[in-house]
Image (cartoon, grey):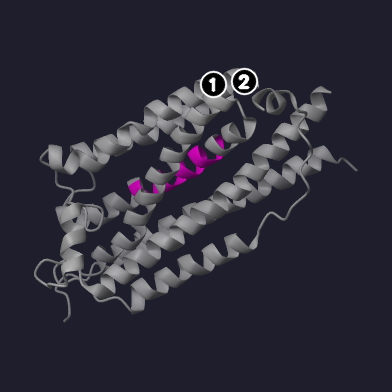
Amino acid sequence: MASVYPHYPYFYAAYGVAALLYAGYAISLYRRIRALRRRASPR
Amino acid sequence: MTANIQSSPVAMPAPGRAVDWIAILAAVGVIGVFVRAMFFTPLELRQGAAQKILYVHAPAAWVAFLAFFLVALTGALYLWLRDERLDRFAASSAEVGLLFTTVVLITGPIWAKPIWGTWWTWDARLTSTLFLWFIYLGYLVLRGAIDDRRMRARYAAILGILGAMLIPFIHLSVYLFRTLHPLPVLASPDAISGLASGDPARRSMPPEMLTTLLLSIAAFTLLYVAFVRVRYRLAAEQDASDAHGAA
């Protein structure tokens, strides 16, 4: 049954923000590990 | 045993991969949940697509509670055993828990606006969740402010334990106070008995929605495990690097 108020923009906004936060944190972890290893073994 | 762990030098961990198979499985699971929520889960009659925010909001809240409970548990164990691995785990879980609480605090208002007509209201559930966020933000700030590892671990363990005491209050706040926030659809005796009864009139949600919710809880719990594993590895390497620098 179709909804009277679909509210898709809110659905996309919530999922989009959550995805950005999770992806951003994953990237930050990767960058922090890479920076630490670079400092630990300077060429 | 405790003394051995305390005094043992921190071995440089093996340079493991930054991304492991659990992380890949978690990412696939989260994407799968999005696809299922989007295309294979029915729309709720009155809320429409806004109700589907449940599948990212509620699992994030569950993971945040789990993360902070584990911060308190490992903090208490650290105070007893003085094992640095417990402190590392607590720090990792607190950081990841703060991420998931941030997701809760952002997706909640996005859901609230079309349904309640307001982004935010200072009711007990929302306000206490915001306080939880501030407490664990303070936990991370505290850790960053203390150089001495043992003192940092001890103070952080105490704050981690005290902060987790908010969790039962947040869960029960919808019963203790008049709030706009709905009652639990899963984590309450009434909800569980209604779902188990098979009676459509007593169910808090239809089976298709329940399956999506359970899958999303599993996927985001796996994501928590993946994040904590990598964050723990970072903390271990940081400690090893500090120990080598000090030597």
Circles 1 and 2 on the same subunit: yes
> Residue beneath label 2, please?
B150
Q: Which amino acid type is shown beneath numbered disc 2?
A: Arg
Residue that lies at the very extreme toward the bottom in this rendered image: A1
Q: Quadrant of the C terminus of chain B?
A: top right
Q: Residue at x 78, y 36 (%)?
A: B11
Give the magenta part as a residue range: B91-104
Is disc 2 surrounded by few (<14), some (14 to 19) or many (20+) residues within 10 Å?
some
Residue B49 % position (x, y): 26, 69
Does the magenta segment cover residue A41? no
Give SS at disc 2: helix
B69 vs B42, left or right, is right
The dominant secondary structure in magenta is helix
Residue B21 lies, with reference to residue A33, above or below; the image says below
Q: Can residue B143 be seen in this view?
A: no
Q: Mark 1 lies on which chain?
A: B
> Residue beneath label 1, please?
B154
Q: Distance between the residues labelled 1 and 2?
A: 6 Å
Nearer the observer, A8 or B84? B84
Marks 2 and 1: in contact by CB < 8 Å? yes
Nearer the observer, B195 or B112? B195
Give SS at disc 1: helix
Question: In which quarter of the view is residue B92 placed?
Answer: top right
Question: In which quarter of the view is residue B231 placed?
Answer: top right
Residue that lies at the very extreme toward the front in this rendered image: B1
Residue B42 lies, with reference to residue B219, above or below; the image says below
Residue B165 % position (x, y): 33, 31
Question: In which quarter of the view is residue B201 placed?
Answer: bottom left
A26 vs B170, left or right, is right
Q: Which amino acid type is shown beneath numbered disc 1?
A: Arg
